[in-house]
Amino acid sequence: MADMEGNKVARMRELVELLNRARRAYEQEDQEIMSNFEYDSLYDELLKLEKELNTTLASSPTINVGYEVLSELPKERHESPMLSLDKTKEVERLKEFLGDQKAVLSWKLDGLTIVLTYRNGELAKAVTRGNGEVGEVVTNNARVFKNIPVHIPYQGELVLRGEAVISYKDFEDINGEIGDADAKYKNPRNLCSGSVRQLNNEITAKRNVRFYAFTLVSAGDTDFHNSRLYQMEWLKRQGFDVVENHPVTRETIEDEVAWFAQHIETNEVPSDGLVLVYDDIAYGQSLGTTAKFPRDSFAFKWADEIRETTLLEIEWSPSRTGLINPVAVFEPVELEGTTVSRASVHNISIMEDLELGVGDKITVYKANMIIPQIAENLTRSGVKDIPCACPVCGGATKISMDNETKTLYCTNPKCQAKHVKAFSLFVSRDAMNIEGLSEATLEKFIINGYVKDFTDIFHLDRHEEEIKDMEGFGERSYDNLQTSIRNARTTTLPRLVYSLGIPNIGIANAKVICRALGNDPDRIENATVEELDEISGVGEVIARAYVDYFADAEHKDVFRRLLGEVEIPQEEVPEDSQKFAGVNFVITGSVEHFANRAEVKEEIEKRGGKVTGSVTSRTNYLINNDVDSTSSKNKKARELGVPIISEEQFLAMLEDL
């Protein structure tokens, strides 16, 4: 008996680790290491074990609301914790919850939760949900949401919660403008999260973020007739868009859930379920909360419509980085009103977990009634026939382990798939920033022979007439393209290095490397592994990839010819450019002498230092103007003996040569 209980405890610990890793990957690293179906199944298994054993681990996802968001936005603690909602897939459970109460049923929107505060009729503050206790201040970004009122009739203090979302149409439009397939956003939620948490609200404004109110927290002594429905109507009168909501009772809940199910496909914004909350405010508040859930509301997740089918093949789709993505192709089935025959499997690890082989009987569903995914493999014949050759170029493939995930790569550096994607990176915003060259356009130019290497892009005027005669092009498009190309001729060395598409070298790494090598092109192309390995933040893996790239004579030749095509203004190198070499900083709180924390970071990096997001044993200084605060970073710094310095002290360090 003891052994059996011990096995259950071990399984519980395994589930906690697995679920937390999956959630971290999804929420913080934008990676999917398991399907929604598998996550929900494992979550339910953990919940059952916790109830059976009457034990809950401190790190369990069933009691922890979320993870701390790492960014450079100011943080702020919520006046009251924002709890998750208890959830069910059974309408009968909603009926039990309702009893004889009237309630409000609305979409559970899939975006980023925001708390807004208005004072004297003006938007005073916007804070993200964050981890439920501490969020990020995004007031400047909220001011440019597409539909948010910055002035309202009510003059008292109003606090409300809602969801920032990006519509499916805007999501498709924004992704359509991104030439590099690997850089495209995975879903509207990720795009919205990144848009709302920008340091530059000009970017937010271009993303068409919308806000839908779903809860009124407080509004002075306003009489809301003890009704959530009345609150929603009142918010409408203040100028807010509110989430679509319907009054329900025990008798009508089933029909209303069916109504929402029928309309989710045509809903313009993403939803991952429904929310049910008691209309009677006083009654709901009198029930209080559990450790994680409020007792006045419930979340309903769709019971997925699952169909059985047969796996016909695994299609392998190469990308610019060489990553070859597996896609399951199966006998067509009807799901949520549409015919489905394909689902992304994401990587080899998920294939192995499913023991997925051609001919297997599988069950498929639509996550959130939208995205086709494999739920289960009923026959589990096993993974086989992983291609040894790239389906595009025939080059050798290899299996790599990235972030605990097995992935397949094409090893041929001259693969045609990489060729188009490489040009797409070259012209992208952080690289040479040449507008008007979508991936489709580049593909046409390459096929027609106008572009053979990167330097040819600067000489497209050789093919002026042919380009103007191309479908979708014309005089105006051609002129705009030429203007963009002329502008791109003035650039920086880090942009040029990043544009080459060297494996593992992003724009941030390119900046660090160029600065450490004195922005000297000769040193850039002849750097050794030893030289690069000494640069803070580079490391041996990146150093080896960099040196291997320039060891190729063709790569060196293209780089030198590119230097002849562009003008790189001399960058001012601070006199104390290595002052902070090997020194690690963490910056927190607001700043007074700089526009934002990004400027502080830039000053540190100019002098060879490094800025990280969290305090560890490797941190040398924590910069916080509130030196005596009891914030988590300050506490951690004190525990580790890391000096906490103010902005004034940091400025003194800069001046002390």
Image: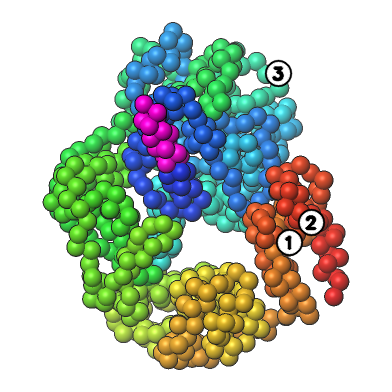
- Whether tag 3 and tag 1 are in contact, CB under 8 A, the answer is no
Residue indicated by mark 1: 620
Residue 316, percent across and down? 25, 63
Q: Is residue 181 above or below residue 103?
A: below
- Whether tag 1 and tag 2 are in contact, CB under 8 A, the answer is yes
Residues packed near mark 2 inside 10 Å, few (<14), some (14 to 19) or many (20 plus): some
| Numbered circle sitting on residue 64 | none
Give the CA distance from mark 3 to mark 1: 50 Å
Give the CA distance from mark 1 to mark 2: 7 Å
Who's the residue at 59% across and 54% down the image? 198
What stretch of residues is rendered in magenta?
Answer: 1-16
Asked whether, in this view, residue 336 is left or right of residue 247, the answer is left
Is residue 3 covered in magenta? yes
The figure's colour scheme reads rainbow
Between 544 and 546, the one lying in front of the other is 544
Residues packed near mark 1 inside 10 Å, few (<14), some (14 to 19) or many (20 plus): some
Residue indicated by mark 2: 643
The mark that comes first in sequence, 2 or 3, is: 3
Residue indicated by mark 3: 221
Dot 1 lies on which element? Answer: loop
Q: Residue furthest front?
A: 2
Residue 505, percent across and down? 51, 72
Residue 322, percent across and down? 35, 70
Q: Amino acid at mark 2?
A: Pro
